[in-house]
Image (cartoon, helix red, strand yellow):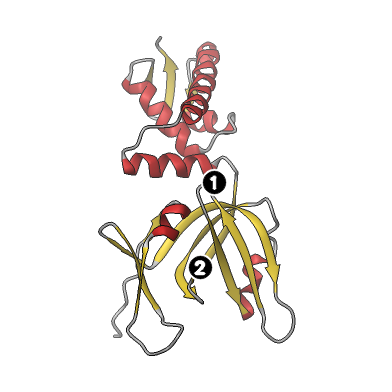
Amino acid sequence: MPELRKRETAYKLRIGDLIKANQIFEESESLNKRLRFVELGDKKITRVNIIANVIDKYEGEGESKFATITLDDGGGQIRARVFSEDIKKFKDVIQGDTLLVIGLLRSYNQELYILPEIVKKQDPKYLLVRKLEIENSYNKPLTPQQKKELYSIREEIVNLIKKSEKNEGIDKENIILNTKSPPEIIHKEIQKLLEEGIIYEPKPGRVRYLG
């Protein structure tokens, strides 16, 4: 039985940090050396998981079939490129879309780019989710704007739970369905409210207001 090759971790990163990282190339006489990995701290990165907005799209004409999109997450910009049959991955992508892009890092003419494996449209609010994930991983404080957005989401959740008291509580799934915020943030805020004793869980999956 052939040996299965382990797929490299797709790191969640800010584009600004990624493009400033140290690029390590294979030793070669070629002018366009092959990128081995990107070195960021103690990480050797070959795959990335990026959430960003599309600010530009271009599709080549003629025999060379390729397409590019430029991604911007507010901290930096990077291109994603597809070739031949993979052009279909960008078929429904338009300028202004928010995308989740998972793919391999490549370099051409000293420009770092992403060769996408997965391209999936996301709600724009997932940009905030990703920023919070990365900020938490770096142990950096939230900005005033991020704090304001989280407070607004928290208040929305608390008010929804308060209104549900006449029905002896509300299921967590219904909170997600009745708010426009990303599920990941809602789950985190519900857990914080439980830990702070503002709400309680009379039975698994259902919460009530305690005050």
Furthest residue in direction bottom, as rendered: 29
Question: 151 above or below 20?
Answer: above
Which residue was labeled with disc 1? 74
- Left of 211 or right of it: where is 87? right
Counting from the top left corner in percent of width and height, residue 96 is at 68, 50
The one nearer the camera, 95 or 125, is 95
| Amino acid at the residue labelled 1 | Gly
Question: 115 above or below 76?
Answer: below
- Give the quarter of the image for residue 132: top left
Q: From the image, which quarter does the N terminus lie in?
A: bottom left
Q: Residue at x 38, y 15 (%)?
A: 198
**Numbered tag placed on residue 161 in the rendering:** none
- Give the quarter of the image for residue 193: top left
Which residue was labeled with disc 2? 113
Instruction: Choose the circle earlier in sequence order: 1 or 2.
Output: 1
- Dot 2 lies on which element? strand
Q: Residue at x 70, y 76 (%)?
A: 60
